[in-house]
Every structure is written in C-alpha cells, then in structure tokens.
Amino acid sequence: MATRTRTAKIRVVVAKPGLDGHDRGAKIIARALRDAGMEVIYTGLHQTPEQIVETVIQEDAHAVGLSILSGAHMTLVPRVVALLREQDVHDVLVTVGGTIPADDIPELKALGVSEVFTPGATTQAIVDYIEGAVTR
Amino acid sequence: MRPSDYLMSTQLQSPLDGWAEAYGATPERDTLFTTLSGEPIAPLYTERDVSSEPGLPGEFPFTRGVYPSMYRGRLWTMRQFAGFGTAEETNERFRYLLDHGQTGLSTAFDMPSLMGHDSDSPRSLGEVGREGVAVDTVDDMQTLFQGIDLGDVSVSMTINAPAPIMMAYYVVAAERAGVPPERLAGTIQADILKEYIAQKEWCFPIDPAMRFLGDMIEWCSQEMPRWHPVSISGYHIREAGSTAAQELAFTLKDGLTYVEQAIDRGIPVDAFAPRLSFFFNAQIDFFEEIAKYRAARRIWARELRDTYGAKNPKSWLMRFHTQTAGVSLTAQQPLNNIVRTAIEALAGVLGGTQSLHTNSYDEALALPTEDAVRIALRTQQIIAHETGVANTIDPLGGSYFVESLTDKMEEQAYAYFRKIDELGGMVQAVKDNYPQREIADASFMLQGEIDSGQRVVVGVNKYTEGDNADTPLLRIDPALERKQIDRVQAIRAARDSADVERTLAALKEAAAADTNLMPPLLDAARVHVSEGEIIHALQDVWGSYTETPVY
C-alpha cells in the first residue's frame, strides 16, 4: 500500500457488515467520533466484507470499527481481516462492537482485532481508545 | 384567633399552595426527574392536571381498554417468538410448544429470509438459521408446519419486505395439506414503512414496496377472512432509539397511511380496519409506557371514526401485542434483566395488551437458552396468576398522574402528525429521513445521559461490582447452514426449470403492469421458485434500495 498522506484528523470507517439492521450503536458511535473531531465515514447497512475493505482503502482510513449484532461475527470479522491482509493493509486499526460473547473475544484478538467493545462501553471510552491506538 | 377566623385564613390559601410551600422548603435529590424519553415530571399530580374522564372499557374512545371485560374475561395471550436453524429444528420446537398447551405459533425468520436472500447466496454467509428459521422455498414452509393442522392453529409470521412471498408459500403449503386459504388464521407483520424508519430490512425502493404489500393486503382481505395481513409495529422504532411519543406517533401514522392506501384501492374501511393489529414496545419507564398504550387506543378510535368514517365499532379498536424492550437488557449482571423484563411486562398488562412476549435475561449476549426462555414465560404467568393485577380492569384508570401523562402523550402524537402532514405525509417524511433523524437524535441524547452517569443503568454505570460472567449461552451449530444450503440446492436440481422461467416471466410482467401480484406469486411458489429468485426478478423491474444514513 502507498505511504499514507499524514493528516491531522483521524479517519475512521464505521461499518455494518452482514444483513441485520441494528444500526443504533453504529450511528451513535459515528456521531460521537465525529463530535470528537475525527473524520467519520459510515458505510450504511448490509455491507459485504469486500465492500468494507474497499471503503477502508479508498478512504485511506486509520481505523475501521465493525458493528455486529447478528451473531455472525465469527464469520464476518475473519473475512474482513483476511481481505485487508490480502490487500496488503497492515496499519489500519480494526475494532469490533456489538453483542459479542466473552468467549469469542480472545479468538477475535488473535486474528488481529485490536479491541472489542461490548454493550455498556461508553462512547468516550471508544473515542479515547481510538485516539490512543491509531497509527498516524 | 377565633375558630371562624382560622377557617377564613385556610380558605384563602388552598391546600395545594400549602403543599407547594412545604415541598419547596425540602431539598430535592440531585437527579433527573424526567421520563426515559426526557419528559419532565412534576413532583405531584392532582385533579387540576386531568382534563377529561377516562370513560369505560369497551366504550369509545377505549382509553381504559378495547373490551368490556378485559382480563376478567380472558387473559392476554402469552406468545413467545421462536425460530432457529432449518425448518426441521423449528418444526420440532413448534410441536413441543403445541404439546405443552400453546395455541398460537410465532415464527422468527433468519436474516437472509428477511432480506430476500437464498441460503446459498454469498450474502447469507454466516447468517443462515442464526437469528430465526431459514425458509428458501415452499418446501421449507411445508416442513416448518409438518404435522400441524393449519386450519386449527393461529400462526404469526414476522416478515416484512418479502412478506407476500412467504404468504404465498404458506398458502401453498396449506393447500398441499388440504387447508384452503379461508380457513387460515394468523398474522403476518408486513409493516414496510417501519422497515425504512427503523428495522432496516428492505428489498425494494419505498413506492414499489408499498405496492407489493398493498397487493398482498388486498388479496388477503378478499380471500382470507381469518387473516390479519398487517401488524403495525412500533417495537423496532423504539428499539432503534426513539422516545415513547415518537414510537406512538410514527406507528399510528404508519397505520393511518395503510388505511389511506386501502381506501385508495377501493377497499371499504370497515372491510379492512377490523383486521389491523399493532405491536408496541414495553420499555422500563413504567408509567410512560402505560400512558402510551392508553393514548394509542384513544387516538386510533378517534381517527378511524371521525377522520376515516369507519362505522363498524371493530374498526375503532387498537388491539396490540407487546414485547419487552430488548435494548433495556444489559450484558452486565444479566440476571438483573429478569427484573427489568418483569416490570416492563407489567406495564404492558396494565396498559391493556392483547398478547405479550417477554424477553429472556441472556439476550444482550446471544439468542436465549431454553432455561432463560422458560423464566421469561414464568414471569408472565406470575403476573397473571399471583400478583392480582388481572382482577380488575385498568386499575390505574383515574390516577391523576397516568391520566395526565396519557393526555400529554396524545398531544405529542398529534404534534408529530401535523409535522408529518406538513412534509406531505408519512411516505414522503420517510423518504426525507424525517423520522429516522428524530430517532437518531433521541437515541444520541439518551446515550449521552447514560455515558455521563446522569441516568443510572444498574450494573452498567453504577453498582457495577459483582458481574456474574459465567452465563450459559446458546450456540447455533454451524453445520445447520451447510444443511440448509444443501436443501435449497437439491430442490433447484429436482424441479422443472421451464416452470420456473415461465412463472418468473409472468411475475415480472405483473410487476411492470398494475395487476395484483399474489396470483403469479402463488404460481411461482407451487413450482418451487425460491425466495431469492423471486426477489431478483422483482428487483429487475423495480430496482433495489440504498439508504442515505442520517446520524
């Protein structure tokens, strides 16, 4: 991947993979990140892993947050991570949010997900985490 | 002071002024005295806050209940929603439920079925049979109800954008079992407006989607006298983060829009309105919820009688199903959710619901286990049989607070109606993202209150110690996805492809013209055309839908 243009603002893709329509959390996070001064690209609903990875690359994002409440996270997250690797993208922070059982979190982290936010995480905690963890 | 002077001085100052003075002298707790929806609540309500008599149950405007006897005559229906894996697993669960005395079935479809994708579509990967049952063809529908007398049981199906397809599968499955459409009883959700507003499971742009559902509603009105072809749903609007007043207003306005559409199609209002039913959320703010249901009955009765000229009193009745609020459940200290659900269920009962689904305590973590589902059902049984709340009708009627909140809720709903009318009606308002934006703003505001600690959520932002992390969770066997993919592919291999092409061509022709789509859908169902194939054929004519999200 080409060298990233250094920008002052953190660019974050908030993405909804899969078929479920639960976008309340994704929209709240998108707004909170925007209010915290980041540039937010919200993909909208029903995205395939391919579409999400394409958005991440096109938008030259520092981070991508995947919001999943359908129970399909163990299928969709590995697919997104693998596609990023295939496209030689290694410096984009990947986070996951949603109804993720605690037992699945170690496996997601082993894949390269840097953090998993489960119900009850505050918007400020998510903002702080992304500000601290992105590679700029 | 002589006794008469004393009397004079107390009459000059009303008892209420005296109370207000005493109240003002006492410090208040440092907290938000607002409802969950952010409405300020006064310290005390008296007769001054109530503008009208609530009337009687079973009498216009039905504030106190739609029936004269309510739960003295018959308890609400305890209807738990179920579905997972393939049609075979769900059929087993259905038969188990019927064997244990349940009289109605409620079908949850999986995400691919809700979105119109076949199980073997790449879009369905990882989601087949996960949040409900996978139904790809009429053969799955037949398996789903194998061994169940469809002329005897009432069946509810929660599906919207592709509802006419599932309706056709259901009618053909019954036809194969020798049960004609006029004997089928039940409900199909088929509330497409709330999909664009909140639930977000769509297949087509709004106008053809409205026409598609309208065709089904019209056909059911003529052919299926025991069927409820639409269940107007606020549940998902609330789950998406709306306030109680928004849930009330948007849902009723959606319902009135369907009434207008039916009238425009030439269906007399009284031939159609008695078959409408509603579906509301029960959130944790107890009195606000009760006021919402009471206001809904009153508004619906008035609008149907006075605005739409319905003469049949059955057309005026706002009958509703209630589900406790999924979003109120916390992943932290999940056993606390049993308490939340009980209080929410009680609000539904005191609000006069006709049927109720109680959520299970583990649903912020995964689909519920059987043990968790049983506790949820027991919660309803405890309310029904132990608490005594079903002994009298509308026990909160006449409460200054509840009556005042009901009036307030009604005012707020009419304010939204006016705003939506100014925008050109509900369909236009939805296209303009108006309700979507109102909901996003409300949910963001509430999240801010929770994040800042102003609004306490027990176990989440206060009293957080002692999380019981070892909750047993239901795991769906990933092999079921493979099994369902094999089923649909075996059906494709065995059917006559000329029949498939012929019926799909007829369907496209009807979609491009203005003829009712139900007859060609039934023909397609009979020759094993899959849901995804039908959706793709219709999308060729109508296009698909992409939302411009607002947040």
Image: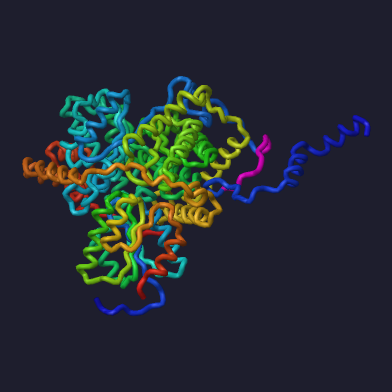
Near-viewer residue (B325 or B210): B325
**Image position of B384 with respect to B470: above or below:** above
Q: Percent x, y for residue B64?
A: 53, 29
Picture residue at 40% right of the left edge, 47% below the top: B331
Query: Where is residue A127, by image quadrant?
Result: bottom left
Q: Is B439 a magenta residue?
A: no
Out of B438 and B207, give the one closest to the viewer. Answer: B438
Is A34 placed above or below B428 here? Answer: below
Question: Residue B509 at x, y = what percent?
Answer: 17, 47
Tell me which segment is drawn in magenta.
B39-48
Relative side of B514 to B32, left or right: left
x, y percent for residue B156:
31, 33
Left or right position of A36 against B177: right
Report the residue at 39% width, 72% height from top.
A10
Q: Can residue B306 be seen in this view?
A: no
With respect to residue B239, does B403 lie above or below?
above
Horizontally, residue B276 falls left or right of residue B95, namely: right
Question: Most extreme residue toward the top, as rendered?
Answer: B73
The way the protein has been coloured in the rendering is: rainbow
Does the magenta portion include B40? yes
Left or right, B180 with respect to B373, comes to left
Q: Is the magenta stretch mostly helix, strand or loop?
A: loop
| Residue A88 visible to an observer of this rendering | yes
In the foreground, A122 or B355: A122
Q: Residue at 66% across / 40% down in the picture?
A: B44
